[in-house]
Amino acid sequence: MSCKCDAKCRFPLRVIADGHSCYNSPVEKTNISNKKIAVGVSGGVDSAVSAYLLKEQGYDITGVYMQCWEARADGCKADEERKDAVEVCAHLGIKFVYLDFIEQYKTKVIEYFYKEYASGRTPNPDIMCNKEIKFGLFLDWAMNNGFNAIATGHYARVTEKDGKFHLFKGIDSSKDQSYFLYPLNQAQLSKAIFPVGAMYKEEVRELGKEAGLHNFDKPDSVGICFIGEVDIKEFLKKKLEVKEGDVLDVEGNVIGKHEGVWFYTIGQRHGFKLDIYTGLPMYVVGKNVERNQLFVGPTKEVLRNEFLVEDLHWIANVPELPLTCGVRIRHLGEIYAAVLDETNKVALADPVFGVAPGQSAVFYLGDECLGGGIIAG
C-alpha cells in the first residue's frame, strides 16, 4: 500500500475516515503527539513493530508484558515470550514493565470458557480476553499510571468521525482481527492504537528486519490467547468429566456413543463413535446437555438459513433495523450476506455450515465492524 503524503513513508499506521494517514503523517501526530503510550509487547513481531513505529514518531513508549498463564503449563511459553519481549524493549531502548494477570485471567476468561462448554455452547476465549484483559485490566492499569493510550499488535484500524470512534478490518485480510475486538466500547477505542492495522504481514516482518528486531521472522502464535496451541478436548477434561452418552441421528435413533456433549461443537465430524454405518459423513448437529445426548447428521443437517443472537453490542452507532449487512461467525471466516431484524434474528442469503451457539456473530458494512453478539441458537 503506497503512501500518498510522503514518498519516503512505506508503512502506514492507520487510514482515517476522510483520507490517508501514515505512521509519520502530521495528521496522525496531531492526534496523539506528546503522549505516553503503553505498548502491549507479547514477544511477537507484530507488537514489537508496533512499539518501534511509535518510538520512531517520538512518543514516550513503555513496553508492557502481560503474563496470564503459568509458564510451561499446557504448553504455555510465557518464559520464552517474556524473554523475547525484554529483548525487544532493550533493543528499542524503551522501558519494560511486567504485569501478572494470571489469577484474573483464570477468573475472567478461563472460568467463562469452562462454564460455556459445560452448558453445551462453544465460546471464544480470545474475544473475552481482549475485552477483559487487554482492553480491561491492561487499559485500566495504563490509565492509572499516567499513560494516555495503549497500543497492541492487532490487525485492525480505528478512525474517529463525527465524535465517534469506528472499528475497521485490518488491511491484511489474512490477518484481520476485528472479529476479536467487536465488544470494545467508545471509551476503550478512544485509547486504543493499532500501529500495524494498515500494514500487510510481509511489510511488518520486513520492517522488523530493517529495524534489527531479533524476532522479525518468529512464527505467529496460535491457539488460546496467552496460553497457546492446546488440545481443546484435553484442556476441557481438566474441569469437565468424561461421561459416556448416546449419539442419535436426527430421527432420534441411537447409533453410537460419545464422551460427553460438552466436548463437541456444532459441525464437528470426529471424536464420537458410530455403531451404524450411514454411508455419509456425519457431523454434530445438536446437543441435549441434560440428557447428555449428541445428535449427528449429514451435511445438509448442519446448514442453517437463520439463527438468533443475544447480548448485542454496537461499537459506534445503533443501526436501524432491519439491517442489511455482512456477518462473520468465526475468526477469519467468510463474511456472509445477511439481514438482522428487530427480533435479533439473522437471516442468511445462503445456507451456512456450522453455526455454533456460544460463538460470536460479528456484523460488517464494507470494511467497518459495526458490532456483534453471541449466537443463541
Image (cartoon, helix red, strand yellow):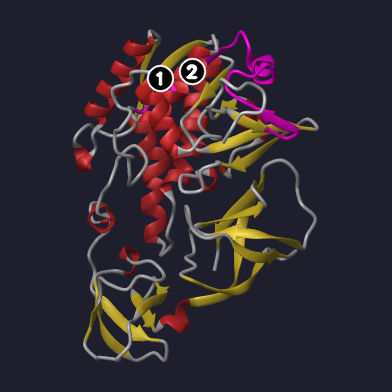
Residue at 63% in and 54% down: 363
Q: On screen, 10 above or below 280? A: above
Q: Decide: is 95 above or below 107.
A: above
Residue at position x 50%, y 31% in the image: 196
Magenta stretch encompasses residue 24 = yes
Location of mark 1 (residue): 64
Residue 217 in the image, given as x and y percentages of width and height: 30, 32
The residue identified by callout 2 is 38
Relative vertical location of residue 194 with respect to residue 114 in this rendering, above or below:
above
Write down the region rendered in magenta.
Answer: 16-42
List x then y, in percent, for residue 189.
62, 31
Q: Quadrant of residue 74?
A: top left
Q: Residue 343's image quarter?
A: bottom right
Residue nearest the observer in this picture, 120 or 306: 306
Location of the N terminus by quadrant is top right
- Residue lying at 23% horizontally and 56% vertically, measured from the top left: 237
Q: In this rendering, would 96 be left or right of 152?
A: left
Residue type at numbered disc 1: Val
Under circle 1, the secondary element is strand
Residue that appears at 56% across and 17% down: 143
Q: Where does residue 256 sit, x and y in percent of width and height?
A: 25, 84
Badge 2: how crowded within 10 Å, few (<14), some, or many (20+)?
many
Q: Mark 2 near mark 1, Cβ–Cβ under 8 Å?
A: yes
Q: Position of residue 119 (x, y in %)?
A: 41, 62
Going by the image, does 308 lie left or right of 222? Answer: right
- Could you tell me how far apart the alpha carbons at marks 2 and 1 are, in whole angstroms? 6 Å
Name the quarter where the C terminus is drawn: bottom right
Q: Nearer the viewer, residue 167 or 108?
A: 167
Which of the two labelled residues, at mark 2 and mark 1, occupies the earlier sequence position? 2
Amino acid type of disc 2?
Ala
